[in-house]
Amino acid sequence: MRSRSTTRADMSAASPSFARVRRTLLARGAAREPRDVALTVYSVGLGALVAMVPIIRTLVLTLAAPGPAAVLTAPYVRALITTGCLLVLLIVTALGGVRGAVVPAPPYVQFVVGGAYPRSITLRRSMLSVHAVSVTVSVVSALIMCAAVSTAGSRITAVTVTSSVAMAVAFGAVLATAWLAGQVFRIVRTSSAVAVLLLAVAGTVTVTGGYTDAVAKIAASTASALAWPASASAVTATIVVCVVSAFVAIVASSAMLDRVRRTELMRQAVVWRAAGTLALTADMRGTVDSIRQPARHRPAHVRWATRSVALRILVRDVGGVLRHPVRTLVGAASALAAGALVPAMLGASANGAALAGAVSALLAYAAAGAWSDGLRSHADNIGAPTLFGFRAGTGILMHVVTPLLAMILLLLAGVALVTVPAAGGSPAAPPPEDASLWTAALALGVLACALRAHGAVKGPMPLRLLAPISTPAGDASILVITAWALDGPVLAIIAGLVLVMAVPGGVLPVLGATVVMLAILAPWAWLRLRDRRSR
């Protein structure tokens, strides 16, 4: 009996080359002609010039402001950029299991990738496209920073620009290869996720423990001269090293393509095809649910000797959350970060306080989603016969207890991480006795969970929102659809900004603002719930 590898080799030898297949398809009119490719390149280039040039100019002017420019010209900027690049590399590698570097369409995976040709051939064009995009983004980012430093008035030479571009090319190629490695090897993406968590813990300890100045001095004294070489010979060596690194990364990615499993590739292709379809219909919740990874742990059957239905629901909700350990850890880290940003609401700068409030509210809203599986499951079954004999609204209130307890504990812990160590080492830091900060953290947790409950009962988008809205500027229905799809994050940002305005006034304004926002959300959620029950 002939082996599978021998049969595959014979099929590969008997199959026509890719060039012949392309010529045949081109002759039949089934492949894209050169003029079609030229039109696509022209359209993409023109769109990039029209849309990207203003964005790039805005970024350059923003980074050239006194505050960001001082950071870009500081002695520790080399270590800061290196740490940032390392963090991006680890995050992208860890996300390889969610969305890999190479995810073609499902029919292509079924009939081409699963055929006789090796995957280093069938997936080569897709991988080269990923390398091209990654290198382009890295080079543009490097040029933006160089332009910002020059605009701010600092002297920047051609040597610095050349070496920065060379290192950006190498980093872009390595980043694409690392992304593919995270898609192929589970141990690589798991190790990257652990490294990201360790770096996050180290950064938190550095900031909250008052070690920022010491770390900055060490980074400035140990920064490598190869990062921005000062001589022509050093520039030449840097360019050679970067080119060799990029070449090795591309060759390594080509070799790793043959290790891509067809089943995993098909799973990601189907998931992201469904996610794209749901995103086009403005179903953001369905999009996130389709991307969410399935549970890797079996449900734990815990015997709870109580007649209280609320306690049973609490235990079951906690058990469901623990079935997703990675997502739970990410949610906990986001909640801690949101709590750590709460003291910044009392910052001296109004813009800085507003930014801290908006980011903190968004992080809290995202973190609450990791603890709301039971809430979403109950909301999805509204209208079906109940198993416990209580109303749908009562079930919503019972299921919201789990994310509420988790968010309150984690947000208070995040505030404590910043205020308690800072109060002992910096006289300018807000004291931990300032009750408005702790009240703001409590309010942030309550509002984040209220927004999650408000979004859980939203249901599918009504068809009446798809009706065109004629205006002199064109059809404005896209604004209504966007508002429907992104109402949760937008309301979270508004809640964060309201808390920023209330925190300086003390505890009573924070409580008053929270009560007012809950009074707005509660009847709105009840109307949505009634609409769900009537369908």
Image (tube, rainbow, N blue to C red):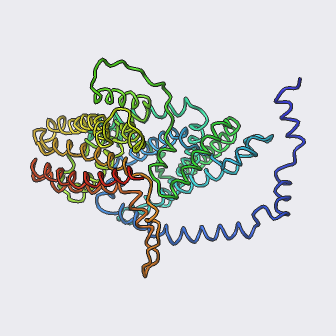
Q: Position of residue 246 (x, y in %)?
A: 61, 46
Q: Nearer the viewer, residue 105 or 436?
A: 105
Where is residue 272 shown, x and y percent of the image? 57, 48
Q: Residue at x 40, y 45 (%)?
A: 383
Tell me the quarter of the image containing the N terminus: top right
* As drawn, 261 above or below 518: above
Does residue 314 sit above or below 504 in this rendering? above
* 455 left or right of 357 in image: right
Q: Position of residue 432 (x, y in %)?
A: 13, 38
Number of numbered discs overlaid on the protein picture? 0
Residue at figure coordinates x 35%, y 41% from the top left: 367
Q: Quadrant of residue 42?
A: bottom right
Q: Is residue 356 above or below residue 255?
A: below
Q: Position of residue 84 (x, y in %)?
A: 42, 45
Residue at x 44% of width, y 32% of height: 324
Report if residue 217 is visible in the image.
no
For this rendering, which residue is in front, 152 or 358? 358
Res 246 visible: yes
Front-most of residues 490 and 70: 490
Question: Is residue 388 shown left or right of residue 346?
Answer: right
In this rendered view, identify the residue nearer to me: 479 or 166: 479
Q: Measured along the vertical axis of the image, is residue 125 above or below residue 257?
A: below
